Amino acid sequence: MTKFYGRKKQRNELVKRLSDRLNTAVVGSAGYGKTALAADAVREVVGDDEPSLAASPYPDGVVFLDLYSDHGQAEPVWHKLASTLCGPGFLERSPADERARQASDGRRMLVIIEGDEEADGHDGHIELKQLLSVLSDENRSLLLTREITQADPLAMVQLDDPLAPREAGQLFDKLTRSVWPSPIRTTPRGSAICGYPIRESPTYWNSSSRLTRIFTGAKLTTLWRRWRKPDCSSRRRTNSSSSTCAK
């Protein structure tokens, strides 16, 4: 497991908000570490195994929604949410929003949303508020966004600056130790990569699949899906057709 570097204040704030089951937005420019911060804070709150998850504020699990992959179109996102929670056969003849609403109903789960820039209400894209309208009162959301206008100022953890040079250097050295020899890792170019958002450097980004696994949403999806698939059969539903939700 990769050690988390820097952002102690923001990390503690996010852990506290997640522990208190508060809807939260992490706001920062591309590459500032929103995804890494979220992964570390969520791991702190829900743990790494099923007993820890069951005892956490989110015993029904953590779901990661990547809006970039569906370009702000609501129906694919809603279908993915429903199918992730209850399987592809759950209410398969129902509209996407109804499937998602029924699948989410009553769950004490955390829904993490990345790519909300796609849900801006323009050019046929849905607005974020409407997209999340399928969630129930028991669900909680963690939004990872570049757009401060998408976040409630009272429910926001903000990353104002890139990682501090010392901490960025430590992270860079840790991740590249087995990839590049020391002379390359200690050049000024390497320092510049560390001092500014990591994902904006193609050289760094493409140098190792290991780095990609650490910093992309796919890593989060793999991690959180491993914890537990929710048991749909014991959930209260608003109509009899919901009984098709399978374990």
Image: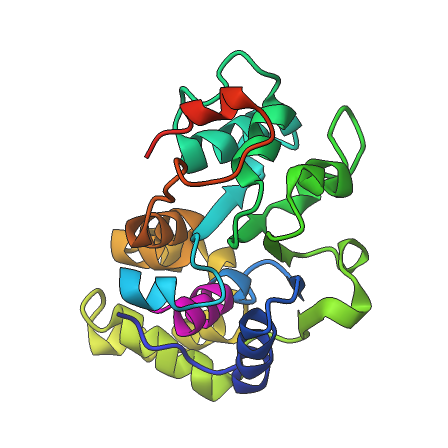
Picture layout, residue 12 above or below residue 36: below
Picture layout, residue 85 above or below residue 112: above
Q: Residue 159: x and y, percent?
A: 64, 72
Q: Quadrant of residue 211?
A: bottom left
Which image quarter holds the C terminus? top left
Q: On the picture, is 180 further left or further right than 126?
A: left
Residue at the image point whose x is 59% and y is 73% from the top: 20
Numbered range of the magenta stretch: 36-49
Picture layout, residue 219 above or below residue 97: below
Give the dominant element type of the magenta stretch: helix, strand or loop: helix
Residue 28 visible, this angle: no
Residue at the image point whose x is 60% and y is 30% from the top: 238
Specify whether residue 219 is painted magenta.
no
Q: Which of 128 and 202 lies nearest the eye of the viewer?
A: 128
Q: Residue 213: x and y, percent?
A: 32, 53
Q: On the picture, is 64 further left or further right than 228?
A: right
Which image quarter holds the N terminus? bottom left
Residue at the image point whose x is 61% and y is 45% from the top: 115
Q: Residue 90: x and y, percent?
A: 45, 23
